[in-house]
Image: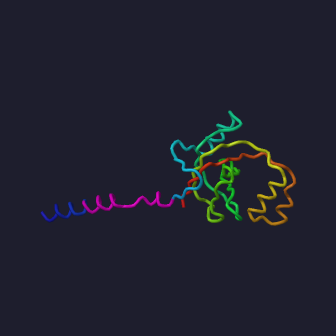
Amino acid sequence: MNRILSILFVALLVVGCSVNAPDVQAQNVKAYGAAITTDNAIGTADLLKSLTLADSVAATVKCEIITSCTKKGCWMTVKLPDGGDMMVRFLDYGFFVPTQGLEGKQCVMKGWATKETVDVATLRHYAEDAGKSKEEIAKITEPETNLMFLAEGVQITF
């Protein structure tokens, strides 16, 4: 009888703890910009495949953050599967993300991906915002064609 009561007590304890346990992951997600859902989010590899078929793609994308603007948080870069990166800017300059501590964090963002040619002055501006040295900035002498994502909303998991 004592054994049955002990097993019943442990079972109730386990069930009680799991029912009342807070969703830790949900507590660590912060939203910026428009409210978005993570439903149907695709990875960056799938995004790149979509961009082989069109010049611009509307998508919800899950990815890893490399860095953000250290001055205002007005842009960030995210990892691509080939080791490259994609610039992320925010719709109408309407919101900002933290200026530090985003490296390696996971995010989901909703918006539009496009290919764009970025001029030397803008590339140097981004390098300055990222805290690059004057020598690194001076080495930027050619425009680049890059992927750019214009996000209407971002969710970052901390």
Side (left or right) of 39 relative to 116: left
Seen from the viewer's position, the closer of residues 27 and 81 is 27
Residue depicted at x 69% and y 36%: 52
Quadrant (top left, top right, bottom left, bottom right) of the N terminus: bottom left
Magenta-highlighted residues: 12-28
The percent position of residue 40, horizontal first and vertical second, equals 53, 42
The image quadrant of residue 133 is bottom right
Side (left or right) of 77 relative to 153: right
Looking at the image, which residue sits at the far top?
Answer: 53
Seen from the viewer's position, the closer of residues 123 and 49 is 123
Kindly report the secondary structure that dominates the magenta region of the rendered protein: helix
Q: Is the residue 69 above or below the residue 50 in the image?
A: below
The percent position of residue 115, horizontal first and vertical second, equals 74, 42
Side (left or right) of 95 relative to 17: right
The percent position of residue 26, horizontal first and vertical second, equals 47, 57
Seen from the viewer's position, the closer of residues 121 and 46 is 121
